[in-house]
């Protein structure tokens, strides 16, 4: 079993298709933080991200079992594309369900006032998130990396240290400098993140 952990993604996929169920659990453990972090960065809702994450792996399993996987060993980008598509499908479906049509008993104008507050809050949150993401992009690469791994992927500092091949103190220091730099940029540019 230990030798399976050393195999590349493509080899694990092949083994799984041949019937070795354990290979899928290795793939999930290997990539769950990255895939879940990506979904969470798009939804900003942990419960929703959990649901989409589970649906992502259900779709992956179904595709593999049908023999329709042909990504030449590029498992993670393929899995992230599935996660992205399912996230977008969720928002499209939600938008469609929230669409109201005028009838004799119902007038669209009655509905507009009820949703305004929620829509304004959501737009404000999205604008704040966009501002934060654009501010993060101005930081040095090592500080960007630690922020994304901590905030969007929910990794511990030990996990960040392991993945970036530095000490825990270094990853903590990068986070500290990232936050100091963000605060400085916000003050210098007089950016208002929320009311």
Image (spheres, grey):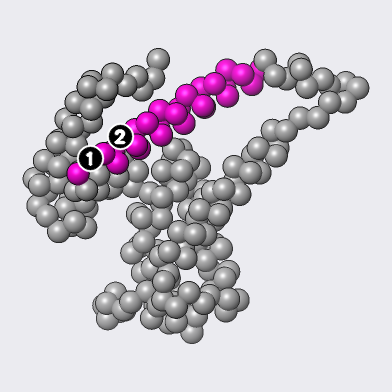
Is residue 22 visible from the viewing direction of this image?
no
> In the image, residue 138 lies at what x, y percent?
26, 39
Q: Position of residue 35 (x, y in %)?
A: 41, 55
Q: Are marks 2 and 1 in contact (CB under 8 Å)?
A: yes
Mark drawn on residue 161: none
Instruction: Please give left or right for residue 85 compared with residue 23 in the image.
Output: right
Residue 116 included in the magenta stretch of the image: yes
From the viewer's perspective, tell me whether residue 161 is left or right of residue 190.
Answer: left
Residue at image position (40%, 32%) is 129
Which residue occupies the foreground of this view, 7 or 180? Answer: 180
Q: Quadrant of the C terminus?
A: top left
Direction bottom: furthest residue: 18
The vertical placement of 87 against 99, above or below, is below
Could you tell me which secondary element the residue under label 2 belongs to?
A: helix
Question: Is 138 in front, or is 171?
Answer: 138
Q: Is residue 130 above or below residue 71?
A: above
Q: Badge 2 local density, few (<14 within 10 Å), some, or many (20+)? A: some
Vertical order, 121 against 129 (above or below): above
Please indicate whether residue 80 sits to the left or right of residue 108 in the image.
Answer: left
Q: Is any atom of residue 29 visible in this view?
A: yes
- Per the image, label 1 sits on a secondary structure element best described as loop
Is residue 166 in the magenta section? no
Residue 180, position as x, y percentages in the image: 16, 30
**x 57%, y 70%: residue:** 63
Q: What secondary structure is the magenta-colored segment mainly?
A: helix
Question: Which residue does the image show at 22% across and 40% down from the upper left?
Answer: 139
Count neighbours of disc 1 (C-alpha within 10 A) and say few if under 14, some if 14 to 19, many if 20 or more. Answer: some
Which mark identifies residue 135? Answer: 2
Q: Which mark is residue 139?
A: 1
Q: Quadrant of the N terminus?
A: bottom left
Report the magenta residues as a range. Answer: 114-140
Q: Which residue reaches farthest front?
A: 189
């Amino acid at each position: 079993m230990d030798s399976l952990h050393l195999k590349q993604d493509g080899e694990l996929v092949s083994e799984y298709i041949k019937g070795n169920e354990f290979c899928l659990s290795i793939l999930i453990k290997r990539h769950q933080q990255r895939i879940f972090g990506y979904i969470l960065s798009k939804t900003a809702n942990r419960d929703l991200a959990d649901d989409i994450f589970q649906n992502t792996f259900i779709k992956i399993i179904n595709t593999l079992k049908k023999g329709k996987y042909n990504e030449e060993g590029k498992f993670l980008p393929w899995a992230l594309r599935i996660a992205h598509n399912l996230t977008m499908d969720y928002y499209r479906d939600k938008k469609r369900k929230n669409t109201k049509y005028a009838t004799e008993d119902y007038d669209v104008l009655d509905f507009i006032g009820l949703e305004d507050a929620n829509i304004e809050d959501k737009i404000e949150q999205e604008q704040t998130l966009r501002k934060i993401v654009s501010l993060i992009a101005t930081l040095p690469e090592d500080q960007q990396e630690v922020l994304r791994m901590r905030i969007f992927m929910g990794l511990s500092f030990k996990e960040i240290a392991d993945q970036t091949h530095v000490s825990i103190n270094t990853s903590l220091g990068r986070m500290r400098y990232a936050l100091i730099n963000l605060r400085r940029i916000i003050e210098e540019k007089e950016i208002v993140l929320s009311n």
